[in-house]
Amino acid sequence: MTEHAERAKDFVADEKRMHWHDQAVWFVRNKRDVARSFVPEWEELRSLGSQIKAHTLSKLPDYLEQFEKNATANGARVHWARDADEHNRIVHGILREHRVTRVVKSKSMLTEECHLNEYLEQQGIEVVDTDLGERIVQFRREPPSHIVMPAIHLKKEEIGELFHDKLGTPSGLSDPKQLTEAARVHLREKFLGAQAGLTGVNFAIASTGGVVVCTNEGNADLGTSLPPLHIACMGLEKIIPSPQELAVFLRLLARSATGQPITTYTSHFHGPRPGAEMHIVLLDHGRSRILAREEYRSSLKCIRCAACMNTCPVYRRSGGHSYGVTVAGPIGSILAPHVDAKKHASLPFASSAYRLAGGRVGAGADLGVSGLRKAAPRARAAHPQSLDAPARPAAHAARELPRAVEETCPPAMTRCARCEQQRPRKSRCRTSGGSTPYAIRTCASDSRRAWSRWADVASRSMGPSKPR
Ligand code: SF4
């Protein structure tokens, strides 16, 4: 039995819960399908999103530097972290400098990836997750099971019991509206007492130096408007060139994630508000290694919409915790084996996606999962017992997946003559001592074609959409 299958055993043994979870997640996937049917240019948008990401990744160092320059000009302080440890130390350093003892945090998968909560708690700082689902799993001292709906594995009755225990709500109360109201009152007090607000970042705009945070609860806005200190934590891959491209991704993200036309709150932060401080922490933590490896590079296009999870029959029937990583499902099955192929060797088999349509897959925004086909044989070689994989999914699952988009302009990298590694930088190689210049080649005609198409679609992207 694979490690994933072993971890999924208890979840699968409770057949009723397994079917309930399957249907709850599939319900969201159906909402996404309805939402996309109102956008006639949906497939074009997905294709554009993929091209914009390919282009941005091919010029990532330039865009990162441009972002840093503009964010600094806006009054924010930009920090660079090589790995999770450095990220946590930077955040803690900022908080210590301001004598912070309580932080309110909006949903951020990156801080989950770094285990920031545990780290700060060890340093005596109280961290309060303010996203409702995140607060629920924080109360239970367990990780989120889904990147968009962190507590999707729990029934409302279980949440009622939890709130009775933690917040003193009446025993047996399971009405979602009343439970939400209780959480709202509890969190309001935490917001008022916080000395710093921490957020993730959905998109960082190179040309303006601004960051964009999407929430449905407005908790990022409250968390950054009340305390005098805002720390935004982001992975390097969140960069996009300009606000024009943002329109494409905002249209894709909410529809793919929850079936909404747009997230309830799309907050733009361009520097600190008067009298406050803003810090942006840029994290690598293996991302530049992924960028340098062609077979994994597409995974950096992922905008974390979770549509691939909602589609994947294995995820729906085994639950997010069975993956044993922060990001579960098909995209997590690419990301985790890249970091440690042996430890996570069973994960490429915990997703049906790579087996379907000859590996040309795509569920939601179709940005990241196409790397699965290549990731699986690598993991299989590292850990042969992974051949004991979940059974091939039913044929109907294949029909659930829409067609994949073509990547038109893969970024070209060059090898550093001294350290022998593929490098995206066009200036100097830091690993080899910084003395060997090397350059990125890009396909100019494809870039030009992509730019003109973006301009066209982005210009009408906020216009009204009609059902097909
Ligand atoms: S891989 Fe695609 S479908 Fe899955 S979360 Fe990322 S963008 Fe969404």
Image: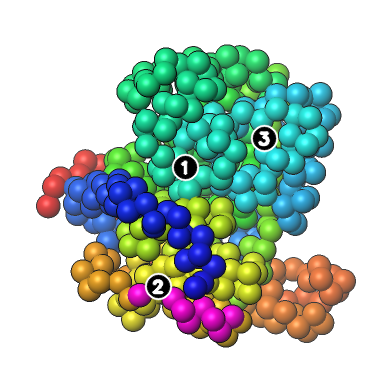
Question: On the image, numbered disc 3 is attached to which residue?
Answer: 231
Badge 3 density bin: few <14, some 14–19, many ≥20, Cα 10 Å: many
Q: Does the residue labelled 1 lie within 8 Å of ligand 1?
A: no
Q: Does the magenta stretch include residue 386?
A: yes
Q: Is residue 426 left or right of residue 166?
A: right
Task: Name the spot of residue 280 as percent of width and height, x first.
Answer: 68, 41
Task: Name the spot of residue 154 as percent of width and height, x first.
Answer: 41, 39
Q: Is residue 153 left or right of residue 231?
A: left
Quick check: 376 above or below 347? below
Task: Name the spot of residue 204 as percent of width and height, x first.
Answer: 56, 46
Write the residue at 67% across / 35% down. Answer: 231
Circle 3/circle 1 CB separation < 8 Å: no
Question: On the image, numbered disc 1 is attached to which residue?
Answer: 150
Circle 2/circle 3 CB separation < 8 Å: no
Task: Name the spot of residue 183 as percent of width and height, x first.
Answer: 47, 21
Quick check: 181 above or below 87? above
Badge 1 density bin: few <14, some 14–19, many ≥20, Cα 10 Å: many
Q: Is residue 290 magenta?
A: no
Tag 1's secondary structure? loop
- Location of residue 178 (image quadrant): top left
Query: What whole-number distance in Å separates the C-alpha atoms at marks 2 and 3?
Result: 41 Å
Earlier in the chain: of badge 2 and badge 3, it is: 3
Give the amino acid type for the residue marked by disc 1 in the picture: Pro
Question: Residues in magenta?
Answer: 383-391
Earlier in the chain: of badge 3 and badge 1, it is: 1
Question: On the image, numbered disc 2 is attached to which residue?
Answer: 390
